[in-house]
Each structure stands twice: as C-alpha cells, then as structure tokens.
Amino acid sequence: MHRMLGLTALCSNLVAPPGDQALSVARNPRMYPAHFGKRVDELFHAKASEDKVPRLFVRCRGRFVTMPDVVFKHGKFWADCTTEGQWAAHEEKYSEEFGEGIKLIYEQP
C-alpha cells in the first residue's frame, strides 16, 4: 500500500491542465479544481492497475461507478483519493456500506 500512498505526492506535480481542459479553464477558471481532480483520479487508477497492490482489493472503481476508489478484500475498509475539504462528504457517502475509510488526500496546487 505504501507505493499507492506515495501517489498523493506525485499528484501534487499535476499543474498545467492538458488540451481541452486548458481551454475549459481559460474560459472558466473555476473549472480548474474539477479538471485537476479528474487528472488525479486518472493517475491514481492507472497506477493502481499497474501495481501488484490491487490483489488486496475486492475491486477498484471504474468510471461512472458510485463507490470508493478502492475497497479492500479483508475487513470493511475502503480508500478514496480526494481533497481534505471533500473527505467528510466521502465518509458520509461510503462508510455505511463499505466500512472505515482511509484518506488518500491530495492538495491542489
């Protein structure tokens, strides 16, 4: 799991949005957090799918599926990559069904 926790530091280096996202942000700067979060999510899932760690998971969330990013096989634990400000909403949304949450917090530059 330690390799995936290091992903939050890696995500901090995602500064400039690519292509269409850059145009969207130029038109509406308030879109930056949404686009940044999408890139963090894509990076997180790419790293999780190439790592050996996913054997610990029941499943990694696919796109457009309402569940935590990962749910662990043993015990009722889940993890989600999000911002500190969104963590409480994630706990409220997932804890009843999936158990105790593990924060994978990133900060937007």
Image (cartoon, grey):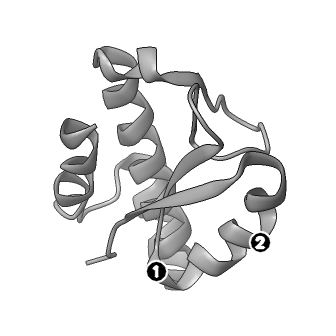
Mark 1 vs mark 2: give the one in front: 2
- Among numbered discs 1 and 2, the one appearing first in the sequence: 1
Q: Residue at x 65, y 28 (%)?
A: 62
Q: Residue at x 45, y 22 (%)?
A: 56
Residue 108 occupies quadrant: bottom left
Q: Check residue 92 in the rendering and tell me which mark sits there, or answer none.
A: 2
Could you tell me the amino acid type at mark 2?
Glu
Give residue 102's position: percent from left, percent from top. 48, 58
Q: Is residue 96 above or below residue 87?
A: above
Quadrant containing the C terminus is bottom left
Which residue is under mark 1?
84
Q: Is residue 72 above or below residue 103?
A: above
Say left or right for 32 vs 13. Answer: right
Q: Nearer the viewer, residue 101 or 69?
A: 101
Give residue 41's position: percent from left, percent from top. 47, 47
The 10 Å Cα crowd at callout 1, few under 14, some 14 to 19, many 20 or more, is few
